[in-house]
Image (cartoon, rainbow, N blue to C red):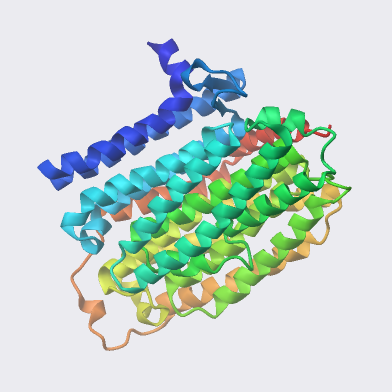
């Protein structure tokens, strides 16, 4: 039984979501609560599987699974290594806490009749991302990317206002453009090599990096994935999507979707193309560092001017994606580990921040910053969690935000990319400005006579508890950072040491 579980763990990480997505609406016909518990059990099982995979590949090396017994390049291969197992664990953990959080928020934001469908689509959304992470087939990545995207469009449209439909439509248009670019790039690669397996692609592309076909392929793939990541200036879909989604979806998407798109780019650039000097001597590392620096600063600057808390957090997320890319683009062990750590750390911080924003919405039915006056007294625990998370976002020592920034700066110094250091320092200062404005509103401004401060509504324990877990981990892994740092460093050593041109 244990051997079966071990050998089939990569495919089970996906199958469990397919089964859950099909089962949830059926159970919902009996009782709405059953569909919720189906989603809860599915995400819990997924988290256990992901952690098991991470421990297994950390101790024993990569784990391969050939779908239907057909070996690549003729069949589809699922492959777990430290890099994708680490991100699998992050995604499954965020999805689990988000669904726990949703026990309270979904009742307030989504009509009872739509909840079984919501849980089903949510499981497809997470399952698609798990598929992207675990597959070693580039076309399979596209298929799972489309599953995730289609589910995401539907989830955003389930928001309470008419703006949710427009946000979903905008994401549909831009997301489809990004996916089309990605597919065109895949087509060019297949035309050049005749294979879709990543490992086989890397081998067959040796000596063909300077061909126009491959150059066009990498251009389409980079642009398509950067649009999916909401890298500046391809970010237009993200602010509305995060602002007008149901609270649970804002939290889940902030902690998962852009991180998975970043993984796609990292995996392809390191496994297939060669980020440092791929085609015609083009230094993709320098290009991505430059784009990431602009993204970091642009996201932070635009966030300062926002009047809605969720929209501010959305623009903040755009800037934080730049940290992940800038760290992983430097081809340095410590910088790469810092970028990978920021996938975990930002997932925890930003998911928790959107959960806090959902808590304010639960009480006030608004996330306008001006409406949060005096909430530090009316919702002290929630506001204190926001304060701690804000300090972590700035990068104050003893928080996870400091750890990932420290590794990125250390890697920048070692690799001679000194321009990264002032970018991170300036971004941290800008982050302090826009979070400081909200903290000032929460704790130091008197509430206006709206009566909101007298409302008896309190956040459900499911919302408070799931947020508190993430806040605790933001401090715990800020003080005891050795475990995630060790995993990230080992992943960095493995992937940098296996670059195709070495």
Looking at the image, residue 136 sits to the left or right of residue 7; the answer is: right
Q: Position of residue 382 (x, y in %)?
A: 36, 63
Of all residues, the one furthest to the front in this rendering is 191
Visible in this render: residue 394? no
- Position of 59 with respect to 385 (left or right) is right
Residue 42 in the image, given as x and y percentages of width and height: 32, 35
Q: Quarter of the image holding residue 319?
A: bottom right
Question: Considering only vertical position in the picture, is 284 above or below 369?
Answer: above
Whether 69 is drawn above or below 353: the answer is above
Image position, residue 23 (x, y; %): 24, 36
Question: In the picture shown, does residue 367 fall above or below 492?
Answer: below
Looking at the picture, tell me which residue is in the foreground, 241 or 140: 140
For image coordinates 62% across by 24% down, the residue present is 73
Q: Nearer the viewer, residue 189 or 142?
A: 189
In the picture, the quarter occupied by the C terminus is top right
Residue 471 at x, y percent in the picture: 44, 53
Q: Is residue 61 visible?
A: yes
Q: Is residue 447 left or right of residue 65?
A: left
Residue projecting furthest to the right = 281
> At x 82% / y 37%, what residue is drawn?
208
Question: Which quadrant, please, contains the N terminus?
Answer: top left
Q: Quadrant of residue 456?
A: bottom left
Please tell me which residue is depicted at 57% across the width and 27% down the height of the picture: 79
| Total marks in image | 0
Query: Foreground: 299 or 346?
Result: 299
């Amino acid at each position: 039984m244990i051997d079966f579980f071990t050998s089939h763990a990569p495919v089970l990480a996906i199958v469990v979501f397919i089964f859950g997505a099909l089962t949830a609406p059926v159970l919902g016909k009996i009782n709405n609560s059953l569909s919720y518990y189906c989603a809860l059990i599915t995400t819990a099982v997924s988290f256990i599987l992901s952690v098991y995979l991470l421990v297994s590949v950390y101790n024993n090396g990569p784990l391969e699974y050939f779908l239907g017994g057909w070996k690549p390049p003729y069949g589809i291969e699922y492959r777990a290594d430290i890099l994708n197992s680490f991100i699998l664990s992050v995604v499954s953990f965020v999805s689990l806490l988000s669904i726990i959080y949703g026990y309270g928020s979904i009742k307030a934001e989504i009509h009872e009749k739509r909840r079984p469908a919501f849980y089903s689509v949510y499981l497809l959304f997470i399952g698609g991302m798990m598929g992207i992470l675990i597959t070693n087939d580039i076309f399979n990545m596209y298929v799972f990317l489309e599953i995730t995207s289609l589910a995401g469009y539907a989830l955003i449209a389930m928001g309470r206002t008419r703006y949710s439909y427009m946000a979903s439509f905008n994401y549909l248009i831009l997301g489809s453009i990004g996916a089309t670019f990605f597919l065109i790039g895949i087509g060019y690669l297949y035309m050049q090599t005749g294979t879709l397996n990543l490992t086989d692609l890397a081998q067959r592309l040796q000596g063909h990096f300077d061909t126009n076909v491959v150059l066009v392929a990498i251009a389409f793939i980079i642009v398509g994935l950067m649009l999916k990541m909401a890298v500046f200036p391809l970010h237009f879909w993200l602010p509305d999507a995060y602002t007008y989604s149901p609270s649970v979806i804002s939290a889940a998407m902030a902690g998962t979707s852009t991180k998975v798109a970043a993984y796609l780019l990292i995996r392809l650039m390191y496994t297939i193309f060669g980020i440092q000097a791929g085609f015609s001597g083009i230094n993709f590392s320098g290009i991505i560092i430059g784009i990431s620096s602009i993204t970091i600063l642009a996201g932070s600057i635009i966030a300062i001017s926002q009047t809605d808390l969720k929209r501010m957090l959305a623009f903040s997320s755009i800037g934080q994606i730049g940290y992940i890319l800038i760290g992983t683009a430097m081809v340095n062990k410590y910088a790469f580990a810092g970028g990978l750590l920021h996938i975990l750390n930002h997932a925890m911080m930003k998911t928790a921040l959107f959960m806090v924003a959902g808590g304010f919405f639960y009480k006030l039915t608004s996330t306008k910053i001006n409406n949060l006056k005096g909430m530090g007294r009316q919702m002290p625990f929630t506001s204190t969690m926001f304060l701690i998370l804000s300090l972590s976002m700035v990068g104050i020592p003893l928080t996870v935000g400091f750890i990932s920034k420290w590794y990125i700066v250390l890697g920048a110094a070692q690799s001679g990319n000194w321009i990264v250091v002032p970018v991170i320092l300036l971004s941290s200062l800008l982050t302090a400005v826009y979070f400081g404005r909200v903290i000032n509103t929460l704790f130091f401004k008197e509430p206006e006579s709206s009566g909101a401060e007298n409302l008896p509504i309190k956040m459900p324990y499911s919302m408070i508890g799931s947020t508190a877990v993430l806040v605790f981990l933001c401090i715990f892994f800020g003080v005891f950072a050795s475990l995630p740092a060790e995993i990230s460093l080992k992943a960095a050593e493995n992937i940098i040491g296996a670059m195709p041109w070495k």
